[in-house]
């Protein structure tokens, strides 16, 4: 893992990262990415996906995002983006949209992108009064000895992972054993919690490292 | 100002913190929160892409028409809506009625609107919102009012507008007033900030923080009078983070279609071509009321202290 300075670009080129801007915590990611020196593009229509190095699907309401994406023909382009193996990071609602299988979804189903071999349970912890923050230790970070403050808002969890999915973080819960809350498969990463609600840039740096990896190959 | 209340949580898991409460509001950004009075309407709202619903017994237009005292909704109705949709459910408590708020929190409502649309229960005190684990949203006409609500523990602000009129003029007035005051703050020195805080009865720290950020330190939505997609886009272009639509949807000719159009307009608020597309063939909008025919007593936005 590398530190902050090396992330500002490879061969002098600045990275261009898209943030899906249909609904949710968009500007928070934009501010953090800008502070890391990358060019940020708000993605609202299919043409905005062109020439991006990576894509963040932020937290918000997964049904809202899915329905708005569907209205403007954005679901298929997003699916082919993910299937072509481009770097993608889904947070909370974004994790639900990227999951192959969803439990506890809206009656009648909801539009989804898929691509990541995981099963998620939407709103696993219950309602907003059950939302919480907690400290996690993330081995994949630089400065991994420094605990990470994870904020969970009506959060989903990962209930099942296939081979090839690496678990990045889990919660220990007395009743249910270990709950998976962050994972990675190839160049796809998902977190059930919200790094954009804190000042800690390490998840964004981890994602930008992934983007660099994809450009190097 | 969000004040942490010490609770019996274990060291590992902390709920009801400022970050957890204001984080909830941040997830609503760019979205539309719709007033609904039953399960059927809640499902129409969810299907249209609403980011949350506000469960209430009567929409503001009917509260206005019926008169009488408007109170918290029937818990059984709120519960039914909570069970019917997967998106967050909000509900309204009267200004100062902290017991209504306690009841709503116990029902599992995701956010409480301490609302001037209901008849106020206290003419001096607002609810001490810091004491609750559930987040609160409050209305404001100007920056001082917004900051006073934050001092009491609200984690989200909305313009008051003039609910139930289908007339956007008051929401625009409130949004512009807040924007203008923030721009003034940014050019003030420390002494002037002290004077401003004193004048608007808001904590100095919040005034200072707002001046430094150049925006409210919390999510700020538009509410009160939004009736067509262009109203939603107007409020977004004025810098609001999202919109509440009360009577505008279910008092119109084709609620499902209008609800979808307002959701799309809130996302694509800067794209006139797409706005034209979503605004077409929506059927009749709610009729609406001109504000100048309302007496002061009929103006909900005058409530709150």
Image (cartoon, rainbow, N blue to C red):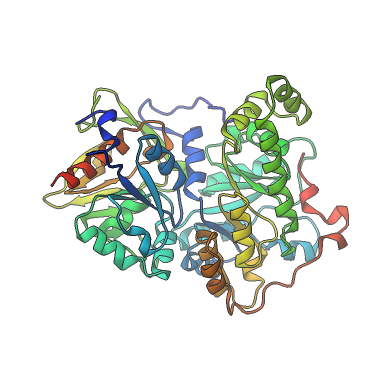
Residue A79: give x, y in percent of width and height.
Answer: 27, 63
Q: Residue lying furthest top in this view?
A: B191
What residue appears at the point 46 percent right and 45 percent down from the top-left corner?
A27
What residue appears at the point 39 percent right and 63 percent down from the top-left corner?
A66
Q: Is residue B267 above or below residue B156?
A: below
Q: Is residue B203 above or below residue A84?
A: above
Viewer-nearest residue: B140 or B121: B140
Residue B127 in sight from this viewpoint: no
Answer with left or right where residue B263 lies relative to residue A114: right
Residue B252: give x, y in percent of width and height.
Answer: 65, 74
Answer with left or right where residue B131 lies relative to residue A99: right
Answer with left or right where residue B19 lies relative to residue B221: left
Q: Residue lying furthest left in this view?
A: A163
Task: Look at the image and tell me in which quarter the N terminus of chain A lies.
Answer: top left
Residue B161: give x, y in percent of width and height.
Answer: 72, 53
Residue A15: give x, y in percent of width and height.
Answer: 30, 44
Viewer-nearest residue: B287 or B66: B287
Answer with left or right where residue B269 lies relative to residue A38: right
- What is the count of numbered marks? 0
Query: Quadrant of residue A118 in the image?
Result: bottom left
């Amino acid at each position: 893992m590398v530190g902050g300075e090396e992330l500002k670009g490879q061969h002098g080129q600045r990275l261009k990262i898209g943030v899906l801007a249909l609904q949710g915590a968009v500007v928070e990611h934009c501010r953090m990415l800008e502070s890391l020196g990358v060019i940020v593009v708000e993605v609202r229509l299919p043409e905005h996906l062109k020439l991006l190095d990576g894509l963040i699907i932020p937290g918000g309401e997964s049904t809202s995002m899915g329905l708005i994406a569907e209205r403007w023909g954005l679901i298929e382009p997003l699916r082919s983006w993910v299937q072509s193996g481009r770097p993608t990071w889904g947070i909370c609602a974004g994790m639900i949209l990227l999951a192959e299988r969803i439990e506890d979804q809206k009656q009648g189903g909801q539009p989804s992108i898929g691509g990541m071999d995981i099963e998620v349970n939407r709103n696993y912890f219950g309602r907003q009064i059950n939302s919480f923050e907690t400290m996690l230790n993330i081995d994949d970070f630089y400065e991994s000895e420094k605990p990470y403050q994870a904020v969970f808002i009506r959060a989903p969890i990962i209930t099942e992972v296939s081979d090839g999915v690496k678990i990045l973080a889990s919660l220990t819960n007395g009743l249910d054993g270990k709950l998976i809350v962050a994972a990675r498969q190839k160049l796809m990463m998902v977190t059930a919690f919200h790094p954009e609600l804190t000042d800690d840039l390490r998840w964004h740096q981890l994602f930008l490292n992934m983007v660099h990896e994809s450009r190097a190959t | 100002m969000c004040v942490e209340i010490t609770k019996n949580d274990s060291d590992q898991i902390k709920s009801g913190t400022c970050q957890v409460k204001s984080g909830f509001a941040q997830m609503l950004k760019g979205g539309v929160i719709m007033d609904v009075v039953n399960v059927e309407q809640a499902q129409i709202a969810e299907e249209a892409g609403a980011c949350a619903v506000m469960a209430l017994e009567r929409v503001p237009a009917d509260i206005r028409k019926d008169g009488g005292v408007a109170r918290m909704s029937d818990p059984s109705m709120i519960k039914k809506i909570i069970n019917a949709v997967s998106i967050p459910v909000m509900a309204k408590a009267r200004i100062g009625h902290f017991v209504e708020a306690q009841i709503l929190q116990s029902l599992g409502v995701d956010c409480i609107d301490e609302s001037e649309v209901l008849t106020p229960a206290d003419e001096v005190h607002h609810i001490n919102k810091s004491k609750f684990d559930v987040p609160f949203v409050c209305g404001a006409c100007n920056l001082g009012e917004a900051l006073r609500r934050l001092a009491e523990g609200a984690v989200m602000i909305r313009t008051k507008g003039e609910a139930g009129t289908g007339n956007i003029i008051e929401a625009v007035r409130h949004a512009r007033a807040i924007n203008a005051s923030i721009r003034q703050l940014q050019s003030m020195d420390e002494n002037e900030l002290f004077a401003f805080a004193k004048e608007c009865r808001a904590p100095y720290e919040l005034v200072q923080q707002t001046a430094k950020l150049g925006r409210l330190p919390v999510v700020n939505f538009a509410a009160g009078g939004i009736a067509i997609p262009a109203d939603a886009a107007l409020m977004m272009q004025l810098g609001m983070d999202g919109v509440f639509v009360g009577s505008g949807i279910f008092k119109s000719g084709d609620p499902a279609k209008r609800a979808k159009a307002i959701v799309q307009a809130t996302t694509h608020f800067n794209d006139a071509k797409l706005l034209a597309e979503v605004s077409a063939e929506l059927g009749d909008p709610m009729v609406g009321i001109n504000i100048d025919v309302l007496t002061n007593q009929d103006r909900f936005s005058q409530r709150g202290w």
